[in-house]
Image: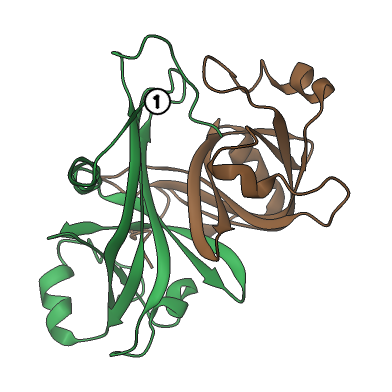
Chain colours: A green, B brown
Amino acid sequence: MRELDRSEALGLLASVSLGRIVFTEHALPAVRPVNHLVDGDDIVIRIHEVGALAALAAPVGGPGVVVAYEADAIDPDTHLGWSVVVTGYARSGCRAEDDERYAALLHPGAGPPRTCTVRIRPDLVTGFRLDTAAPRIIPICG
Amino acid sequence: MRELDRSEALGLLASVSLGRIVFTEHALPAVRPVNHLVDGDDIVIRIHEVGALAALAAPVGGPGVVVAYEADAIDPDTHLGWSVVVTGYARSGCRAEDDERYAALLHPGAGPPRTCTVRIRPDLVTGFRLDTAAPRIIPICG
């Protein structure tokens, strides 16, 4: 099991389109799968203002909300693969110009309109990769 | 996009072996991929006492720690699939008899010994399924 450096971890995150945003909702831990893209070093997701992720739509100009973001690609049988966890401030904006820039990239589709862009600035980036070069299969649990 | 009832959601959770445990670590949101099994209604994972998940190893007999647990199987291209999120108290025990019962089922492998069993009792169970019966593809984000 090899730890990933920041650059490698963000590269792997950018190689997939699905992850899980982890936040606090009514003082409880909460998590939702979302589509993402990596724009520079930032992770960008789109939300709608009244959904489960509305807690992330903090007032513009505020410090933002601390979240974690996780993505992985792990084979359930062999446990080979990787996982990346980013922790940082999520800052939101609900602007028409963001719609134009991100809507197509993030597959807005037919669901409720994603009126807000949430941008997560990675503060702490951790991750591991477990590949066939490892001498034995090591579980990812724990 | 169809919401899942509790029974269906726990059934889907039991059909996979990998999920993500969501908890609070030093007052920050944290998430780790882990192997799980569903035993009755409980979700069972194994941890080692000094790792990232040590915060879950609360004193035996205490109220436990509130966590969320998420698993999904979502096609990154079509967005078809399902996601389940469970919220509840995690209670831990570090007993030899749990080793015997769960170690083989949870693939202890060659990593650091998983000396503690964490049992999550689902309080709130939510989930959705998006399948081909839906009239259009709806993104899972937001």
Would you place residue A90 above or below residue B12 in this image? below
**Image quarter of the C terminus of chain B:** bottom left
x, y percentage for residue A111? 35, 69
x, y percentage for residue B75? 34, 42
Name the kind of residue labelled 1 in the image.
Asp
Q: Is residue B100 left or right of residue A124?
A: right
x, y percentage for residue A61? 28, 90
Would you place residue B38 above or below residue B124 in this image? above
x, y percentage for residue A2? 33, 27
User: Is residue A115 in sight in this rendering?
Assistant: no
> Based on the displayed image, in which of its 4 quarters is residue B141 positioned?
bottom left
Q: Is residue A124 left or right of residue A102?
A: right
Q: Is residue B77 left or right of residue B129?
A: left
Nearer to us in this view, B64 or A101: B64
Within 10 Å of disc 1 (Cα), the crowding (few <14, some 14-19, many 20+) is: few
Nearer to us in this view, B12 or A28: A28
Q: Which residue is mark 1?
A: A75
Q: Residue furthest top?
A: A135
Residue at 42%, 70% in the rendered image:
A66
Nearer to us in this view, B5 or A49: A49
